[in-house]
Structure formats: C-alpha cells, structure tokens
Image (tube, helix red, strand yellow):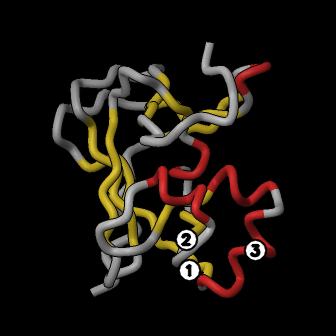
Amino acid sequence: MWGNSDQRKLLKVQDFGVKGRGVIAMEDIRQGELIERSPVLIIPHEDRPKTDATICFTYVFMWEPGACEEDLYKHKGRAAIVLGYTSLLNHSYTPNAEFKHHIDEMFLDIHAVRDIKAGEEITIDYQMTLWFDPD
C-alpha cells in the first residue's frame, strides 16, 4: 500500500524571512487529524556520501527501521527526501504536529498534536541536534 497522497489539509507555503520558508494551515485542523501524507524518494546508503554533502542533507529524514533522525549524522543507512510540503516544515521544541514514518510503504504522515488554527504555522520537532540556532 502506497497511501493516499491526496490526503492533505489546505496548506500554504509562506516566506518567514530569516527563518526561511514554512507551511501554514489555511483551515482549522483538529488534534489528531492527518495534515499531510507525503510519498518519499529513497536515498540508498551508497548514495548518501554524495547527497549528504549537498543542501539536500538539511531536508532529509532517516529511513531505516528503528533509526531516529539523529542517526542522519552517522551518514549510514537509507535516508529519504519527503515530497509535498512536509520538507518545508520548520522546527519547534513545542511543535503543533508530529511525523510518522511508514518505512515499507514509502510515505510519511504528519498529524496535529493539538488544534491548529487557520493562519498558524505548522511545525515539527526535528528530533536531532540542530545545525542552526532556532531562536
């Protein structure tokens, strides 16, 4: 099963200045609701040295069973480029959304962890040591 990639709330990409692009909700989203289901492109382990040396590294998710996002820094195993708006979600230590890997099905889900109002930025916790200052 690949998942239904048509399952997306109304979202908009917005420029947040020095923070870069991010994603805002264009409709109210209730806690627990699916915000987006994104297909992924797998980066095989043997291709990681080439891609990790590019800007792509700052947008990928770890894609191995049992791995965590911090494992990206080991530069081993598969990673994934997540399509859709998901790769543009900004980090927060108090996020309003969370992600769930579906490794074998090759998609990633974003769910609301609390109610999100229309116009509010959607954020996730990157779950790794950050390479930038989030303040």
Judging depth in this view, the residue of 27 and 110 nearest the camera is 110
The residue under label 1 is 42
**Left or right of 101 in this view: 54:** right
Report x, y in % for residue 60: 59, 59
The image quarter containing residue 14 is top right
For label 3, the SS is: helix
Q: Residue at x 40, y 74 (%)?
A: 64
Question: What is the three-letter code of the residue carrying label 2?
Answer: Ala
Count numbered badges in the picture: 3
Judging depth in this view, the residue of 109 and 36 nearest the camera is 109
Question: What is the three-letter code of the residue carrying label 1?
Answer: Ile
Q: Is tag 2's residue or tag 3's residue first in the polypeptide sequence?
A: 3
The residue under label 3 is 49
Q: Which residue is drawn at 69% across and 75% down?
A: 48
**Left or right of 74 in this view: 5:** left
Q: Is tag 2's residue or tag 1's residue first in the polypeptide sequence?
A: 1
Report x, y in % for residue 61: 51, 60
The residue under label 2 is 79
Q: Is tag 3's residue or tag 1's residue first in the polypeptide sequence?
A: 1
Quick one: quadrant of the C terminus? top right
Q: Residue 76 carries which label?
A: none
Q: How crowded is mark 1: few (under 14 residues within 10 Å), some or many (20 or more)?
A: some
